[in-house]
Amino acid sequence: MSSKTIYRLDTTEKETLKHWYYLLTLGRKLDERAPNYLKQALGWSYHAPYAGHDGIQLAIGQVFEKGVDHLFPYYRDMLTVISAGLTAEEIILNGISKATDLASGGRHMSNHFAKPEWNIHNVSSCTGNHTQHAAGVARAIKRYSAKAVAISSQGESSTSEGYVYEAINGASNEKLPVIFVFQDNRYGISVPKRDQTANAFAADNFKGFKNLRIIHCDGKNIFSSMTAMAEARRHAIENQEPVIVHASTVRIHSHSNSDKHELYRDDNERHCAKASDPLDRFRIQLLHSEKFTEAELNEMDEQAQKEVLAAHRKAIMAPDPAPESIHNFVFTEAYVPTKFPDGIHNETGGRKLKLIQALNETLKEEFRLNPDTFIWGQDVANKEKGGIFNVTKGMQQEFGPLRVFNGPIAEDYILGTAEGMSRYSDKIRIVVEGAEFADYFWPAMEQYVEISHDYWRSNGRFVPNITIRLASGGYIGGGLYHSQNIEGALATLPGVRIVYPSFADDAAGLLRTSMRSKGPTLFLEPKALYNDPAAETIVPEGFEVPFGKARIRRQGSELSIITYGNTTHMCLSAAEKVMNETGKSIEVVDIRSLIPLDKDTILNSVHKTGRALVVHEDKVFAGFGGEIAALIADEAFEFLDAPVRRVGSTFTPVGFNRILEKAVLPNEEKILAAIKELLAF
C-alpha cells in the first residue's frame, strides 16, 4: 500500500509553489473581474465568487488526472477547473456565454464549467445532483478496472438534498472509487449551517456509513487541502471505496452577484472573512519562507493580469450562439432498422410470444450481442425472481451480477447512476427498471429532467444512452401508485423518446431499437397486457421497429381511431363490432411511438376518413391525446366532417376498488359510444 503524502511548505519544490501561486492569482483576478462583465451588459449574469475556497479548489484540480479521472465541479469551482487546466480564455467564454464555450456553447448557466475531452463534466444547476452522476461513473471505473476516481464537489448545504444521501449510501454499499468534496463555507446563500444540519460538520451526518472514509481539512490552507485530496485519491483507488473530504472554508463575498451578504452578515463577520483570505496568507507564507521575493510574486501577479486581459480580448470577439441553433442536439441519432424498416412483418418465420416473453427474450438477445450492456433496478435479480413481473427472469443467471443487479429502493439513484455510468464510454448501453410501477417514478424526476437536456445542454458533447423501462397503466385493480399513466406529463420535456407498445412484436422491436440507439428512451410497458392472449403475436427473429412510425392495425374508411397501449385492443374490438352491426369500416392507428410522433400516418388516415377519435388510457384533460387532437385540428381541419373527439380517463386518480377503476378508465363501451356519436354527426 502506498504511504500517505504530506504536503508542507519546506518540502515542496519552488517550481511547484510557483505554479500553485500563479494559478491562485490567475483565478482570483478572474473571480474579481467577472462581475464587471455584468455591469457592462456583456454577460456573466450568474457568478458565484470562490474567494475563500482557494486551498481546497487548488487541491482538487491538482490531484485530478485529466483524461483519467472524472471531475464534477459545482458552480463555485472556478479555481478548481483552472487548477485542472482550463485557460483564462475558456473561463471567460463560459462566463459570457459564447458559442465557443466548451461547457455548453452558451446553452447552460454561466459558472458551469466543463471540458468534456478531459472528463470535466457539465453538471446540473440542481445543487448536489451530480453526486449521483459521480457515483455512476465510479461504478463504470470499477467495472472496467480503471485506476481512476470520480470527484464530486459541492457546498456543504447541498448535502441536505435527498439525492446526496442516496449517492453516498449507494457508493458505500457498492464500494465505489468516488470522492465527495464538501466545501463548507457555513452558508447556503443566506441560510446559516445551523439551519441545515444539527452537526457542526456536514460530513458527520454520514459517520455511520460502512465502507466510507471521512477526511477533514482546512480548505483555506493549500498544504492541508493538498494532503487531504492526495490521500483521498490514494485511498479511493487502493481500497475501492468512497471518501468524503470535508474542507472548512470561508466565503469572503456574497453568495453570487444577485445576493447581498450585507443583509445577513454584520461588519465584524465580513471583516473576519476577508482577514482569512487564503491567497493573502499563502503569499505571506511564501515570503516568510524566503523562497520568493516580493518582486518575484509581483511579477507573477502582473503576468496573470496580462493573461486575463489577453483572454478577454479574444473571448469578447468570439461568436455568439446563433438563434437557429436552438433546435440542434435536442435528440440524438436513433438506430435505424434495416431488416424491418417499417416495423411491419408478414407473420412468418417467427414464434408466437406473449408480450412479457418478447421483452425477456429481446433483453437477453441484446445482452448477448453487446457485452457493454447493463441492467439494474428494484427486484430485477434475486434468485429466480426477475422484477415484480419477472420481465428480467433468468438474466442474472446468464449474464452475471456485474451486468444484472439490484438497485436500492431509491429511484433517484437508479436513474442518476445510469446517467453517470453512461458518461464513462459511448459504447455502454444501460437499461434501468426506473421503478417497480410507473407511478413510483416521480422521485427520479430530477434525474429524468437531467437526461432530457444532457445532450442539448452539453451542446452535443454528451448523451446518456439509457432505456428506462416502466410498467404502466391500469386494468389490474392496483389503485393509487399501481395504475396511473405518466406519459402525458413526461412528454412535455423535450429530449427523451417515449414509446408505448400494444403487442408482443412491437414490444420486442421497439425495445431492440431503444437498446441499440444513442440517447434516452422512456419505454412504457402496459402491464395488464404482459400475459394477455390479446397481445400475443408472432415475433420474427431480430424484429425491429423504428421510432416515429405508427402501425395501421385495421384498415377503414369511415373513421380514424388514433390510439396506443392498453386501449388499442379495446379500439380494435369496438371497430369489429361496428363493422358487424353497421357495415361501416373503422381504421385503427396504433401510434406505438409518442415521441417522435408519426404525424404523416395520422394525417393521411384522417384525410381518408374525415373523422378522428383519439383514445388513450391516460386522463383526457392534459393527456397526450390533446396534442394529437391539436395536430389534426391544425393540419387536417379542412378534411374533417366532424369534430375531433377524445376518450380517456376521468380527471381523477384511478381507484383501487374495481367499481371505481371501471368508472375512471376508458373501456370498450365508452369507445363504442364515441364512435357512434361521431359517425352520426
Image: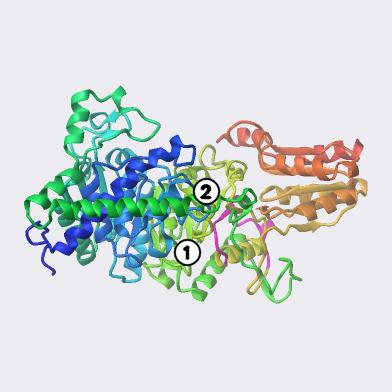
Residue positioned 20% across, 28% down in the render = 269
Residue positioned 22% across, 50% down in the render = 56
* Location of mark 1 (residue): 393
Queried whether the magenta region covers residue 388, the answer comes back as no
Residue 107's tag is 2
Q: CA distance from mark 2 to mark 1?
A: 42 Å
Q: Is residue 295 visible?
A: yes
Total count of labels = 2
Say if 51 sits above or below 557 in the image: above
Of tags 2 and 1, the one toward the viewer is 2
Looking at the rendered structure, the secondary structure element under dot 2 is loop
Q: Residues within 10 Å of mark 2 (few under 14, many from 20)?
A: some
Looking at the rendered structure, the secondary structure element under dot 1 is loop
Q: Residues within 10 Å of mark 1 (few under 14, many from 20)?
A: many
In this image, 15 relative to 309: left or right? left
Which span is picked out in magenta?
A: 517-538
**Which of the two residues, 259 or 347, is positioned nearer the viewer here?**
259
Say if 468 sits above or below 619 in the image: below
